[in-house]
Amino acid sequence: MISFISVTGAGGFAFDYTDFNDWRQPTDYAEWRGWTSVLAKIRSAHPEIVIDHRQQCHNWGPWNQAAGTYSEPIAGDENPESYGAAGEGGVPSLSTDGVLANNLRRVNYVYRNGQLMPNARIPGFMSHQSERSFDDGMGPAQQNYSDVHLRDFDIRGFRFSLLSSIGTAGLNNVLAMLPARDMAEFTAFPDSEVAWINRWLNFTDKNQDLFQNLLSVATLDRGAAMNGGKPAVGFVDGTAAFDEDSGHGVVFLFNPGPRPVPTVLTLDESLGIKNSSSSNAWQVSELYPREVNGDLNTPIAVQPHSGSFSVTVSPLSALFEDNLGGCCVGPTPDRNGVEPVPHWYCCVCTTGRTGWGV
């Protein structure tokens, strides 16, 4: 393999299904150790190449990272038929993108907290991948894919999917589906939606340093017996990131269930805010849906360090209304009104309206 790269100048290798099922080996560890040695030698000889190793590799947790392997989005096939209407996490939805979004956040929670994966490696995945089987039961050998499949871009759910990806993997934006099955679908997609997508993708570009610090909101963890902070009906899940020096920050909250769910945020270390900023105060504002002339800043409240405010996150309902909720924070004076502190952003992501209380 090393010689192959040297001779051909290939950019790397892609592997699928390294299952370690050799019955002749005394343990799985022996197989894993041997395969890791192969990857490490390839990486040492050609550090510039890409090693795209997926489908079961993620089961090895942080130990699969040493050779620069690939972290698979939602830890498996991205096709809807692979995870069903309730997803692997058991959160049912009538929206294909809603199910994928919940699956993505569940897996990225494990990647971040269970496998200690750095934010630069956590995979994003926006919208769903079309099913690999045809609607009439035929396969690709019998007829053209695009002639058989119905248009399946989820116009009602894609915003929830996009923000779920940005809110858990904002450094790796992957668009899995475009509304372009045919020219009619392409031209019918509203320009306003294209602008909305670009606005949020630009948001991640402008805040790359911030997204390096993304972590799960500590106060939303329900404990191991209740699956920690993974998406679940009746609970809010979310992430936060704050710049240690400037105090800049972002918070994303999600409600995958059918009913509104209240929660409380506290401006302290649970969101990644340093205790050294205890004299500061933040202006809480809404990011979306109340975008004013396309600007992501609608003031809601002012809170000091360690101050708490309540948020009621609307449901991801069967109607899939097209408005997501959010909040952000702009510069405000400290408690004594002496000096300004940096922006702080909070985005509450649902497909319904969001209620705020202070």
Image (tube, grey):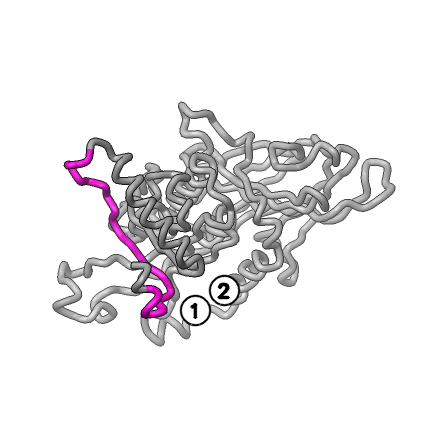
Residue 101, horizontal then vertical, whole percent: 41, 48
Most extreme residue toward the top, as rendered? 225
| Of the pair 120 and 240, the residue shown nearer to us | 120
- Residue 178: name its quadrant: bottom left
Relative image position of residue 271 (x, y in whole percent)? 61, 36
Vertical placement of residue 158 versus 302, above or below: below
Q: Which residues are magenta?
A: 5-25
Instruction: Answer above or below: position of 191 versus 237.
Output: below
Which kind of residue does numbered mark 1 sit on? Phe
Residue named by callout 2: 193
Whether residue 157 is visible to the viewer of this picture, yes or no, is no
Residue 267 occupies quadrant: top right
Q: Is residue 222 left or right of residue 13?
A: right
Image quarter in which the C terminus is found = top right
Q: Residue at x 43, y 69 (%)?
A: 189
**Secondary-structure class at tag 2:** helix
Q: Which residue is mark 1?
A: 189
